[in-house]
Image (cartoon, rainbow, N blue to C red):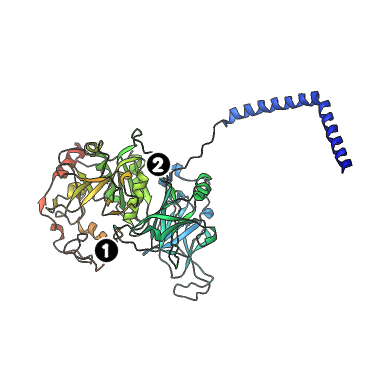
């Protein structure tokens, strides 16, 4: 043992001696190498501009108007990807809607792909199927053209029962469709309180009531069928179709900060038997919102709406409201088939700040409005929730800006409520050529209900909303705006060719469809019309008790071209 220590000490002394002996020469070469390396790095870095310190930032999922135009306008040469490979477009999920099958893909700008006609909806029967009703065998597949494309969505015709779906360009990406009414369909990461808001159908929570959140939890993961790899978090609030959970730290660090693929998120019951909803929801990241009075929001007045096949009315609605003070429009498209993208792109190119957001989920207006309120919060001081057949009207020639400034120094006011006047067909058998504001001038006497303009940060965490108005958080209050200051002209009962489209399906979750034999006498229906889309003989003259030309006269005075006599829409 002593001999081994002696040998080790001898080696250490030998090494030290050698190092000291070569200090002069080796030190010179080391100094030269260091100086040379510093010189090379300095020149390289100055050219490559890599001095900057990297700060991780959460990217917003809210597209700008400019990016929306580029991504959805086929006439824009910038919209076409030069390297788009149709075989790279894969189906992530399939959802069975009442009248179509929705394919959710991994591509975010399907409208801009070259040769879209090559995309086909492919239906593959189950291996055990021997049905020959559509000449499908276990080895054959049915290819049908899609009904429409929008951003990342492909809408396919209903196919045979039991089939799996894919695109013809990527046939191995097969998916059995989820049911639309048993599904987590959208989600948002809210940076204000580091929570995740999940929108889901399947638990049948009651309208306008807060449910017990301890019965539910959010689950996060890439594969929700594998419970070993899921991250869970208890629900904070649960109401209608909206659930809010604290975002787990592991989700924040793993997915958001590292910027890898965002996880799926769903809702799971805590009571046995435990139920986890299928999900297509990967959370969008909201823009950060700073709670400070010094930092002004970009827009004082924005509008959210949900539409289906309303493209022909959109130009008048946007142009009018721009003139009275609206600065930003968020359009939630509920499966339109009338090329609404082209109208939105045209308005965007005309400097209207308008965004089209695909929202294909059936009977989810309340959830869509809550989703929109959160997305608008960072940039919009006030947000109005009205339909495309509803127009703010100011009898005394005021503007929305004039009305809102009265509440600038009243931060406890979270909602402005405005009465609505319902207009009838006004003698028209067809839609008036000059638009609804000029064409329809006869209405009912009594106002009906109200619509709201809200401060987004004033909303209750549950985000409960019913018929266009929200529940507010504690300490906030609502104010009724007088009819002499502001009201809404609701062109509810238009010419029959327009009105009959309401029989297709209502967008509200808790309102019966027009064809349903339910709540037939409700104010949500046309009095005396029933449940069948059959035009009454006297329809053009119904709902006409007062001749009201106030808004029509203002529109003609402000918008009419003095040379041509035409209106801009």
Which comes before the other along the chain, label 2 or label 1? 2
Q: Position of residue 117 (x, y in %)?
A: 45, 56
- The residues tagged by marks 2 and 1 sit, at their Cα atoms, a distance apart of 36 Å
State the residue in front, 121 or 254. Answer: 254
**Residue 424, above or below 395:** below
Label 2 vs label 1, nearer the camera = 1
Label 2 sits on residue: 64
Residue at left offset 24%, top offset 69%: 517
Q: Quadrant of residue 144?
A: bottom left
Residue at left offset 40%, top offset 41%: 64
Q: Quadrant of residue 409?
A: top left
State the residue in front, 267 or 8. Answer: 8
Q: Position of residue 332 (x, y in %)?
A: 34, 51
**Numbered label attached to residue 512:** 1
**Residue 355, above or below 21:** below
User: For the residue labelled by badge 2, is the local secondary structure a helix, a strand or a loop?
Assistant: loop
| Classed neighbour count for the residue bearing mark 2: other residues with Cα under 10 Å, few (<14), some (14–19), many (≥20) | few
**Residue 485, above or below 265:** above
| Classed neighbour count for the residue bearing mark 1: other residues with Cα under 10 Å, few (<14), some (14–19), many (≥20) | some
């Amino acid at each position: 043992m002593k001999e081994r220590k002696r040998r080790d000490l001898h080696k250490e002394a030998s090494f030290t001696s050698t190092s000291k002996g070569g200090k002069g020469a080796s030190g010179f070469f080391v100094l030269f190498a260091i100086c040379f390396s510093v010189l090379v790095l300095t020149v390289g870095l100055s050219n490559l501009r890599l001095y900057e310190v990297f700060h991780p930032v959460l990217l917003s999922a809210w597209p700008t108007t400019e990016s929306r135009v580029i991504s959805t306008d086929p006439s824009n040469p910038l919209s076409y990807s030069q390297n788009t490979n149709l075989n790279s477009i894969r189906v992530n999920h399939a959802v069975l809607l009442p009248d179509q099958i929705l394919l959710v893909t991994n591509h975010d700008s399907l409208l801009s792909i070259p040769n879209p006609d090559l995309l086909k909806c492919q239906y593959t029967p189950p291996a055990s199927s021997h049905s020959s009703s559509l000449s499908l065998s276990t080895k054959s597949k049915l290819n049908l053209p899609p009904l429409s494309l929008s951003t990342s969505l492909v809408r396919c015709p209903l196919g045979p029962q039991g089939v799996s779906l894919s695109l013809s360009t990527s046939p191995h990406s097969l998916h059995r469709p989820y049911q639309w009414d048993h599904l987590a369909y959208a989600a948002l990461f809210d940076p204000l309180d580091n929570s995740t808001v999940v929108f889901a159908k399947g638990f049948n929570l009651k309208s306008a009531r807060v449910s017990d959140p301890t019965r539910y939890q959010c689950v996060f993961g890439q594969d929700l069928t594998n419970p070993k790899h899921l991250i869970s978090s208890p629900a904070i609030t649960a109401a209608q179709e909206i659930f809010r959970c604290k975002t787990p730290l592991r989700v924040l660090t793993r997915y958001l900060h590292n910027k890898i693929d965002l996880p799926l998120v769903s809702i799971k019951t805590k009571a046995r038997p435990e139920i986890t909803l299928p999900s297509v929801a990967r959370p969008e990241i909201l823009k950060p919102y700073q709670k400070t009075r010094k930092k002004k929001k970009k827009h004082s007045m924005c509008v959210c709406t949900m539409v289906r096949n309303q493209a022909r009315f959109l130009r008048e609605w946007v142009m009018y409201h721009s003139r009275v003070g609206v600065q930003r429009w968020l359009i939630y498209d509920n499966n339109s088939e009338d090329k609404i993208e082209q109208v939105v792109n045209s308005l965007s190119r005309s400097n209207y700040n308008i965004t089209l957001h695909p929202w294909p989920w059936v009977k989810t207006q309340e959830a869509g409005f809550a989703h929109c309120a959160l997305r608008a919060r960072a940039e919009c001081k006030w947000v109005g929730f009205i339909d495309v057949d509803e127009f703010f009207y100011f009898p005394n020639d005021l503007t929305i800006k004039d009305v809102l400034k009265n509440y600038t120094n009243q931060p406890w006011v979270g909602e402005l409520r405005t009465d609505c006047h319902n207009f009838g067909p006004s003698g028209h058998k067809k839609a008036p050529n000059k638009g609804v504001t000029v064409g329809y001038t006869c209405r009912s006497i009594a106002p009906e209900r109200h619509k709201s303009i809200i401060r987004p940060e004033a909303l209750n965490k549950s985000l409960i909303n019913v018929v266009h108005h929200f529940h507010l958080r504690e300490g906030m209050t609502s104010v009724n705006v007088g009819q002499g200051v502001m009201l809404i002209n609701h062109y509810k009962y238009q010419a029959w060719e327009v009105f009959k489209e309401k029989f297709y399906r209502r967008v509200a979750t808790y309102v019966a469809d027009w064809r349903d034999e339910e709540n037939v006498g409700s104010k949500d229906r046309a009095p005396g019309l029933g449940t069948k889309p059959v035009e009454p003989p006297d329809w053009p003259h119904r709902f006409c008790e007062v001749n009201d030309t106030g808004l029509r006269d203002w529109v003609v005075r402000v918008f009419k071209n003095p040379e041509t006599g035409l209106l801009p829409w």
